[in-house]
Amino acid sequence: EVQLVESGGGLVQPGGSLRVSCALSGFTLSDHHMDWVRQAPGKGLEWVGRSRNKAYTYSADYAASVKGRFTISRDDSKNSLFLQMNSLKTEDTAVYYCARTSVQNGQRHDYWGPGTLVIVTS
Amino acid sequence: DIQLTQSPSFLSASVGDRVTITCRASQDLGRSLTWYQQKPGKAPKVLIYAASTLDSGVPSRFSGSESGTEFTLIISSLQPEDFATYYCQQFKSVPLTFGGGTKVEFK
C-alpha cells in the first residue's frame, strides 16, 4: 500500500528555517517524480516544487515564489523526501503536502500525504 | 507561466443536479490537465487526468472533456458526497499551476 506522511511542521519566526520531511512506503521512490504542494489557510492549492526521478538525474524545479529559498532533496535509500525552507516569510504559512506524481498515460499527483502545517509568525 | 482560470468560483446546487465546471488555460496544454476534488481538512484526490481519463475508483458520474484551451468537468447527477472544492492543474510545463478552485455548496 502506498503511503506518504509528512512531518516537521511547526511555528517559526520570519527569516527562520525549517525542514519538513515526507516518509514514503509502498513504492520505489527513485522511479517517481515527487512534488510539494502547499495550501495557505482558506486558500487554493499552490505548487511549490518538484524533484524528478532517477532517470532525470533527480533534477528539481521550483515556483518563483520560493526559488532560492526552498530546496527539495531526497534520500531514496531511506524512502524520504525533504523540503528545506530558508528565509521564511509570513506568506509561507500553509499546509505543506508531498505528492507522488504518476506519468503513465497522463500526469497526476496520484498519492498525497495528509499534510503538515507550517506557521510563520513573530 | 501557464495561467488556469477556473469558473465559477462558487456554485450552489442540489442533489441530482448536473454540475459543470470550466478551466481555461492561457496556452495550449495538449491534454495535460488533471481535476481534483478536495474536502475540508483533507488532501486533494484525483478525479480525472489527461483531460478525460477517469481515475480508478472514481464514479462514472464524473467526466472530463477538452476543447482547445477550455477544459470541462461535469458531474452528471450531484450526490451528497460531492459537495467539495474542485481544482484543475496543468502538467504541460513547470511551474505546474492550479486553477483557483470551485466550491460546490448545498443550495
Image (cartoon, helix red, strand yellow):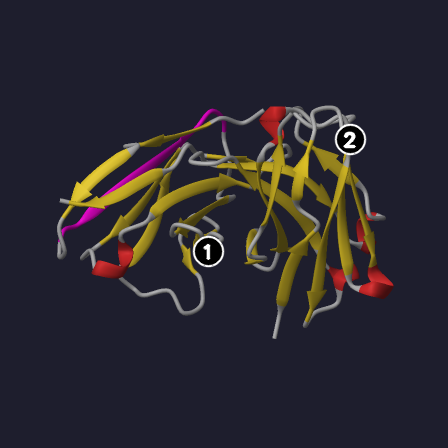
Q: Residues within 10 Å of mark 2 (few under 14, many from 20)?
A: some
Q: Quadrant of residue B61?
A: bottom left
On screen, residue A84 above or below B57:
above
Residue B46, numbered label: 1
Q: CA distance from mark 2 to mark 1?
A: 31 Å
**Residue type at the position of mark 2:** Asn
| Residue toward you, B81 or A16 | A16
State the extent of the magenta-drawn residues as a range: B17-27
Chief SS of the magenta region: strand
- Horizontally, residue B10 falls left or right of residue A34, namely left
Q: Which residue is disc 2 drawn over?
A: A86
- Using the image, name the chain to which the residue with label 1 belongs: B
Horizontal and vertical percent position of residue A93: 59, 33
Secondary structure of the residue carrying numbered label 2: loop
Kindly identify the residue that appears in the image at 83 percent across and 64 percent down: A78
Horizontal and vertical percent position of residue A31: 75, 61
On screen, residue B55 above or below A12:
below
Horizontal and vertical percent position of residue B1: 58, 24
Kindly identify the residue that appears in the image at 75 percent across and 53 percent down: A81
For the C terminus of chain A, the quadrant is: top right
On screen, residue A115 above or below A28:
above
| Residue toward you, B77 or A103 | B77
